[in-house]
Amino acid sequence: MELSDDAIELRPWTLDDVPAIVAACNDPEIQHWIPVIPRPYTEADARAFVLGEVAGIGSHSFAITASRRVVGSIGMKVNESRSGHIGYWCAPESRGRGLTTRALRLLCKHSLEELKLERLELITDPDNRASQRVAEKVGFQREGVLRSHLAHPDGRRRDSVMFSLLPGELV
């Protein structure tokens, strides 16, 4: 399945995307905000991701492309309560152009209208204002702080901020 607007396309990952995934996932900023990705991030890690062999990755996982070039990633895991949990990242050279916001809007529209999900949620680090702005531009509402929610590779635990989007709230 593919989703698109006039600027981006969300499409399934392919093995041809491995170099772009490796480059992005070794970016210090992506590693800072997403503590669960391996460090260093290898071609083997990227191949496992593309082939769906990574635990916790949902069946709705897309490359965000612009002009046929990978600019980011967005994915969603759906649970038995008809809720989707969304995560995303944007490659360094593509930040600040609104591409992740467009991708989130496309996935949310599809999830609410076609998949008929009843709740979408995402979490961010409390200090990740860029990710929070992306969520808010699409209509997500800040719900609260999940204390000591994510373990980081250095052993520390960090809070997370929970955001949700319900049917009728998409902007």
Image (cartoon, rainbow, N blue to C red):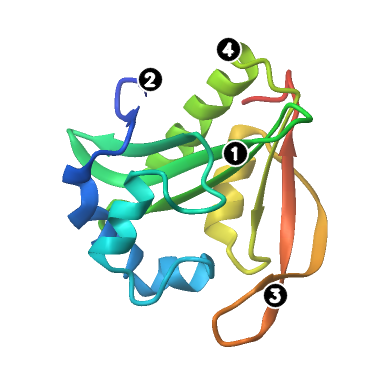
Measured as percent of width and height from the top left, residue 113 is found at: 61, 13
Assign a secondary structure to mark 3: strand
Residue at (30, 56) in percent of width and height: 46
Residue 88 visible in the displayed image: yes
- Find residue 109 and report its horizontal and vertical position in percent: 56, 20
Distance of mark 4 from mark 3, alpha carbons? 35 Å
Whether tag 4 and tag 3 are in contact, CB under 8 A, the answer is: no
Three-letter code, disc 3: Arg
Q: Which numbered circle lies on residue 158?
A: 3
- Circle 1 sits in a helix, a strand or a loop, which is it? strand
Q: Are marks 3 and 1 in contact (CB under 8 Å)?
A: no
- CA–CA distance between discs 2 and 3? 35 Å
Kind of residue indicated by mark 2 = Met
- Picture quarter with the N terminus: top left
Can you tell which quarter of the image residue 93 is in?
A: bottom left
In the foreground, 50 or 122: 50
**Which residue is the extreme one toward the top?**
114
Q: Which mark is first along the chain, 3 or 2?
A: 2
Which mark is first along the chain, 4 or 2?
A: 2
Q: Measuring 43% from the left and 53% from the top, which residue is drawn there?
A: 89
* Residue 41, picture quadrant: bottom left
Which residue is painted at 33% across and 32% down in the image?
12
Q: Residue furthest front?
A: 53
- Are the residues tagged 2 and 1 within 8 Å (C-beta)? no
Q: Which residue is mark 4?
A: 114
User: Which mark sits nearer the N-terminus, 1 or 4?
Assistant: 1
Q: Marks 3/1: CA distance?
A: 22 Å
Residue that badge 2 annotates: 1
Give neighbour class at mark 3: few <14, some 14-19, many 20+ (Cα, 10 Å). some
Left or right? Give the position of 101 relative to 94. right
Q: CA distance from mark 1 to mark 4?
A: 15 Å
